[in-house]
Amino acid sequence: MDIKVSVILPTYNEKDNIGDLVLAIDKEVQASKEIIVVDDDSPDGTSQIIQKMIDQHQVLNLRLITRKQDKGLTNSIWEGIQQAHGEIVLWMDCDFSMPPKDIPRLLKKIDEGNDVAVGSRFVKGGSFKEDTSDSEDSWLAVVLSRLMNVFIRMMLGRDFKDYTSGFIAIKRSIFDKITLTGDYGEYFIDLIVRAKLFNFKIIEIPYTCLPREKGESKTGSNLSDYIKRGSKYVWVTLKLFKLRMKYKFFRIV
């Protein structure tokens, strides 16, 4: 099977978005590809929607992995990587906050010689959710995300802007050296720092992170949820800061 790109979609309770998202990705990505939906056995029927699309041959090379053990975002992405056939893997959120139309821009940057291409809200031209008034996303999530990225950049390097992106295209061969670790979004901080350690070529491209189209946010809905998530980000950042001080493998610029 000659597959250039493996698009990995980690899902939990995304029945209202996943079908339309798969169709949008299939339309936008012209390269030879597979789309792998990795579902944490969602009780809302997310897996069943994808299985029906597979049975009806709606999308070529659409695959479904339904996970019933070791659930969680990082584990789902990692299993998708392990089972991917493409030379490039790409993953993203499944709520349309990361526009499928921007995927070809990420893939182009890999074709141009980069090892890692990240969709960034914080480089010039990028922006955060433009309007949270009619969505599940709150101003609190926006503010805390910005503050968290400022803290991480101060500790780990201002040359990279969006340490909590989660919208990424990356050469699959990189995972011969790097394993994803963590529970939720903190895995991305660790991935970027270790990619720096190995001197992989990383580039950020701007994108506009849009409000979730349907369903409920997995990040949290109140200050307590955000503090719980944020504490893990802080812990990982401090651990990686110690690593930076030990090996001095990149400068804060």
Image (tube, grey):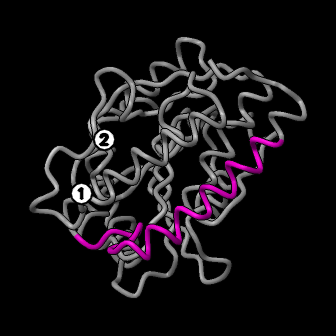
**Can the viewer see residue 34?**
no
Q: Is-magenta flag for residue 117? A: no
Using a 10 Å C-alpha cutoff, classify the residue at mark 2 as few (fewer than 14 neighbours), some (14 to 19) or many (20 or more).
many
- Camera-side residue: 33 or 125? 125
Using a 10 Å C-alpha cutoff, classify the residue at mark 1 as few (fewer than 14 neighbours), some (14 to 19) or many (20 or more).
few
Residue found 77% across the figure and 50% down from its top: 239
Q: Which residues are magenta?
A: 215-242
Q: Is-magenta flag for residue 225? A: yes
Residue 65 vertical position relative to residue 148 in the rendered view, above or below: below
Residue, far right: 246
- Residue 11: image location, x then y, percent: 44, 67
* Amino acid carrying mark 1 in the image: Trp
Residue 14 vertical position relative to residue 146 in the rendered view, above or below: below
Q: Is residue 17 left or right of residue 150?
A: left
Q: Which residue is mark 1?
A: 139
Residue found 44% across the figure and 27% down from its top: 106
| Quadrant housing residue 15 | bottom left
Residue, far top: 112
**Can the viewer see residue 219?**
yes
- Camera-side residue: 153 or 4? 153
- Image quadrant containing the N terminus: top right
| Quadrant housing residue 152 | top right
Looking at the rendered structure, which numbered label has been put on residue 194?
none
Q: Which residue is mark 2?
A: 100
